[in-house]
Every structure is written in structure tokens, then in C-alpha cells.
């Protein structure tokens, strides 16, 4: 199973479907930017969601495919 991350600021999605390496780099950069620059955002406004993607069905990465292997 693969994890992807979505990053939000005030509930608006800024980045979606980041792998763990991309997420870690982007998350630290955003936290630094909010702390250094005058923006409309505070650190408390930044949130993220971790999503575990299950693969299966036709072998294509699709959120509509059920988990598991091909049945044939």
C-alpha cells in the first residue's frame, strides 16, 4: 500500500498526492515560509491529510477500484 499526502491552508488544498519525500520537503518549506514571510496564514492554518492508497482491480491506480488482486 502506498501513502500520499494532501496539504491544506485554511481548508484549501495547496498540494495533493505528494509522496512521502515530496511531502516532507514541501511541509517544512511551507512552515518556514509562514514563519518568515508576512502572509494571511498562521502555522495553525496549515494541515495535512495522509491517505493510504490500496491497489488492485485492473492494476491501474484508481480510487474507484476495490482493494485486492485481479480475480482472473
Image: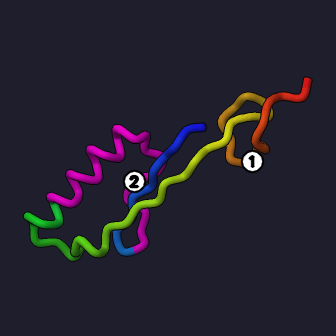
> Of the numbered discs in the image, which one, if any, rests on residue 64?
1
Q: Which residue is mark 2?
A: 15
Dot 1 falls on a residue whose secondary structure is loop
| Residue 21 located left or right of residue 57 | left
Which quadrant of the rendered structure holds the C terminus?
top right
Q: Residues within 10 Å of mark 1 (few under 14, many from 20)?
A: few
Residue located at (42% from left, 72% from top): 11
| Residue 41 located left or right of residue 59 | left
Quadrant of res 7: bottom left
Q: Nearer the viewer, residue 69 or 59?
A: 69
Q: Which residues are magenta?
A: 11-32
Report the residue that reaches farthest toward the top: 72
Q: Is residue 70 above or below residue 31?
A: above
Residue located at (23% from left, 74% from top): 41
Q: Nearer the viewer, residue 38 or 55?
A: 55
Quadrant of res 36: bottom left
x then y, percent, for residue 55 = 68, 36
Amino acid at each position: 500500500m502506498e501513502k500520499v499526502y494532501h496539504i491544506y491552508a485554511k481548508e484549501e488544498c495547496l498540494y495533493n498526492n505528494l509522496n512521502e519525500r515530496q511531502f516532507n520537503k514541501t511541509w517544512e518549506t511551507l512552515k518556514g515560509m509562514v514563519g518568515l514571510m508576512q502572509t494571511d496564514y498562521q502555522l495553525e492554518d496549515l494541515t495535512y491529510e495522509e491517505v493510504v492508497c490500496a491497489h488492485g482491480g485492473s492494476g491501474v491506480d484508481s480510487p474507484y477500484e476495490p482493494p485486492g488482486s485481479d480475480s482472473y
